[in-house]
Every structure is written in C-alpha cells, then in structure tokens.
Amino acid sequence: MSVFFSSHRLQVLITGVLCALLNTSCASPAPEAAFVLPGIGPDSVVEVAAGPQYARGRVYKFFWGRHYRKEWATPVPVRVFNLSTVVPGGLTPMQAGGSFQTKNLRLKDRNGVEYVLRSVDKDATKALPARLQKGPIGRLMKDQTSVIHPYGAFIVPVLAEAAGVYHTNPILGYLSDDPALGKFRKDYANALYLLEERPDGDQSTVRSFGQSARVESSRKVFTNLIGSARYRVDARQYLRSRLFDMWLGDWSRREDQWRWASFPSADSSTRYQAIPRDRDHAFFKFDDGLLTHLIGWVKTNYQSFHKNIRLADVEGLNRAARPMDKSLLVYLSEKDFQEVADSLRQRLTDDVIRRSLQVWTPEIYALSGEEFTEKLRSRRDQLPAVAAKFYSLLARDIEIPGTDEPEQFVVEPAGVGQVRVSVYRLIQKQAPTLINQRVFNARDTRSIKLFGLGGNDVFEINGLPDARIAIHLYDGAGQDTIRQQLPQSTTSNRITLYNSNDGNIVKVGKAIKVKDYQPAANEFDGTGWLLRHRLY
C-alpha cells in the first residue's frame, strides 16, 4: 500500500506549489548513496542499513521532515536468509506481487504452507504517472518512505499477543543473490526483507491466527456476510483490533489489510475473527517538517505517531477503515466500547511495552527506544477517551444492512429519546430468529438507515418511534412488505420509505413518507454492498 496512493495527484499539486512559492528546489534530495553489497557467506550475519539514501542535511529536514531518517541510515546486524534452510525443507518462490509501495514475493514450504517476503524499503513513486516517477516529484515521494519506521513491524507481535489481537510474526533478514530465487533472482536479490506467514487457508497450527482451519480474504468474508445471516463477525474482537490500530497510529486499515479466521459452529453458522496484517503505516511520523506539516493539514488521515492522540484527530485516523467499521460495529453499545478499551489499557502494561522494544538491535533501540516507550505509555492511557470518541463518530449516522436472504426489520420506541431496531432471519415454516438488535439514543444518533438488500424482506414500524431520530427504509431487491402497526400517528415521525416499486406491499399511515426512487448501485443488493466497501 502506498503512503500516497489515494491522493497522489493532490500530493503532486501541493508539492509543486510549495516548491514554487518557497523557491525550494524539488530536486534537492542528494543522489542515493552507493550501495555496497556486503560480503556474504553461508548462514552469515551482515551489517546493512535499511535505507542510507534517506540521510539528509539540516535544511532539507527542516522543510521535508526528520522522520525516521537516522533509523533508516543506521547499519544493523541482520541474518542472511537462505531459502533452502530458512524453514525445514526450504522455501520455494511462487509468485511476485506487491502494492504501489511494497515489493512482495510469495513462497511455500514442502507442506504447502505459504509465506511472504515483504521489502523493508518502499517505493511510493509507482503511484505516480510514469512521466513523473523519475523526476523531482518522484524523488520527493521516494524520500518520504522515511516517514515509516523500518523496524516498527517487529515490535508488534509482543504487543498484539498481550492485547489479545491476532498478528503475523515477521522475521528480519537479508536476501542475497540466492540461486533458489530462480526467475525472481534479478528483481529480489540483495535486499532487506521481512519474512512472515501468509494468513490464508489452513492455519490450524498457527496460534497467532487463532488456529483456524480456514483463513479467508475480506472479499470472501464480505460476500458471505451479505449472502446469509449464517455468517457473522465477532464484533468485540474486531473492535479490540481497531483500538489497537489507533494505539499504534496505524491509519491505513482498508479492507485489504485484513484476513479473517473462520470458526464453524454446530448450527451450521460461521463466526469470523479479524487478523490484521501489513503494519507499514504504524508509528507514522509525517508532520515534523514545515512542508509535510502543511500537507498534513490537507490530508488529515496522515496521522503522525505522537505522545498524545488528539480527539479531533480520531476521525482522520480511522477514515480508511470507516466503511468496515460502520458495518461490523453497528450493534455494539457505548458500554462495549468502554469495556474493550479498559481491557486493552490493563493488558498493555509497562512491562509488555519494555519487552516489545527489546526485539530491536541496540543500535535501533538507542535511537527509538526512549521515544517509543514514552509514546506507547501515554497513548495507552488515552484509549478509553479515544474509544468514546470513536463510538460517537460511528453512532451519529447508522447504516444497518440485511443480506440477500429474507429478513424482518422491526423499529419501535424503547423509551424517551430511544429507538430499538431488531433484525430477524426469516425461514419458511420456522419462527423468525433474532440476528441482532440495538437501542439507539437521540443523544448520540441522528439517523438510522435500514437496507433490505436481497430477499423478500419485511419492514415493520411498531408504535411511534422518537421523532428526534430520522429513520430511512431502503427496500432493495425482492418483493418486500412494509407495514406500520397501530397506533398510527397523523404527525410526522421522520420516517421515510424509499420504494423502488418492484412489487412491494406497502401498508403504512400518512405519517410515513413514501418516496419513489431508483436504487443506487450500492443500495440495491449484496453486490452493491460489496461495491460500497470497495470489494467488488
């Protein structure tokens, strides 16, 4: 994932304008330092710097940031990966990959278990048009790789284990010109990598993936979630992972940054638990230069890893994951958010933080150890307040999807200023089965949208829901029934039915507004919901 992939045009414009205004040469980065290959013997340890080219002078750093340049430029002892011996039986390269920034290589062992090599150094210039990649803008973007701590991912497993969050187990290593690379030798030899398990398929032997016999992609999981109510996500476990993300300052948590451990139940249902992956943007340090600070004002999702998590920054910190958060956390209460945050604060002790930082070499600990200790402790103590802010952001405008199977949505008053929404699964010749429900308070929530998606759904309005919360009913595909139970009000309750006129049965009073409309692609059925979540 590129640091700038979602906004590279804006980045180009801002950078060009700032350079012109300040008469700063965009070509000012010095040429990359010549890289001398270390002498490598069998099973040796080499001294290598992750990115000596990111070292810069004082004036340049004033404008473009100090970032983690010292950590990138400092040589550290690193073991050499020998693909024939790194795991029992060796690893065989399978497929090259990667995103706009990270170069990946998928491998498998003799038992078919997959691993991935991910480059420590990054290259964000691939997000740019080809004509700009080698020019001054490209050099600046490549230079901003230094906003990422080159060894940040390696302290996460100890922290995640204590937090109760699933995690990969990266190992740092140097890949030499290994003949075992085969056809990938030219592109992947002589570089620093992290090697980790690939969370996919049968992971029944990997405790940090929940020992799940089937780990699946977000695309597969969301397809199942929208296809049938038999599939559910463990919402509190996902919330724990998301609060852990915020503690690390990891703002790039899109759908593709997750895998899901599946656990079948005796009743033929399946429960999913979240496996975060790719910690490239944890501990992000971007706003410590004059120009990068200005860019941060525009791109508020570029959240830097500070001692304090400002509550005003929580929205930007979570923008990339917002579509997932709104769907998967919709039934959790404010109490749930506080309980999970309190649990994390208690688990992430000073001793856990200390042990996590001991995985760094003495050279890197001397540069980052004290800083990270102070920041992780301070941010941990803020988690309850951050969770409260996170809850308030998600609670304001609610979206509740059904599935492509028939459901019954029941909306009813639950006290002064409160509305209860219950969703039931409808199965022929069986009593409706409660899927989930939640009581919403007008203090937190201003609107609730219910999406029937596929199937012949039933929308039922009971009594007189509090008018302070606007309720919107979207019928979706299928021949749906929309009915209002007595008493029916003659005054507006701010309830609107969006009727696509595809054979629905509508039995409501005058208080409910009925609007004819053509459903948007992301409002109609399960496929549309996947489109909304960038998974189709």
Image (cartoon, helix red, strand yellow):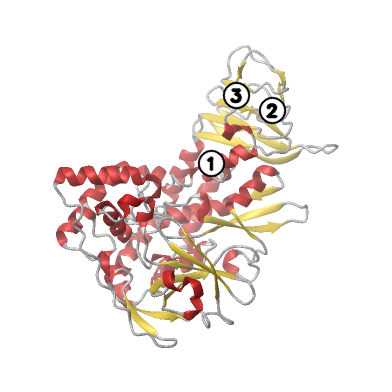
Query: Residue at the location (67% across, 64% down)?
Result: 213
Q: Secondary structure at mark 3?
A: loop
Residue 297: x %, y % from top left: 29, 43
The image's mark for residue 459 is 2
Q: CA distance from mark 2 to mark 3?
A: 19 Å
Q: Quick one: label 2 or label 1, which is nearer the N terminus?
A: 1
Q: Of the residues shown, which amino acid type is indicated by label 1?
A: Lys
Q: Which is more foreground, mark 3 or mark 1?
A: 3
Residue under label 3:
518
Specify whether 25 is left or right of 170: left
Q: Secondary structure at mark 2?
A: strand
Residue 436: x %, y % from top left: 67, 41
Q: CA distance from mark 3 to mark 1?
A: 24 Å
Q: CA distance from mark 2 to mark 1?
A: 21 Å
Q: Of the residues shown, which amino acid type is indicated by label 2?
A: Phe
Q: Of the residues shown, which amino acid type is indicated by label 3?
A: Gln
Whether label 3 touches label 1, CB < 8 Å: no
Q: In this orientation, which residue lies closer to the viewer: 41 or 62? A: 41
Residue under label 1:
326
Q: Can residue 510 be seen by looking at this rendering?
A: yes
Whether label 2 touches label 1, CB < 8 Å: no
Q: Secondary structure at mark 1?
A: helix
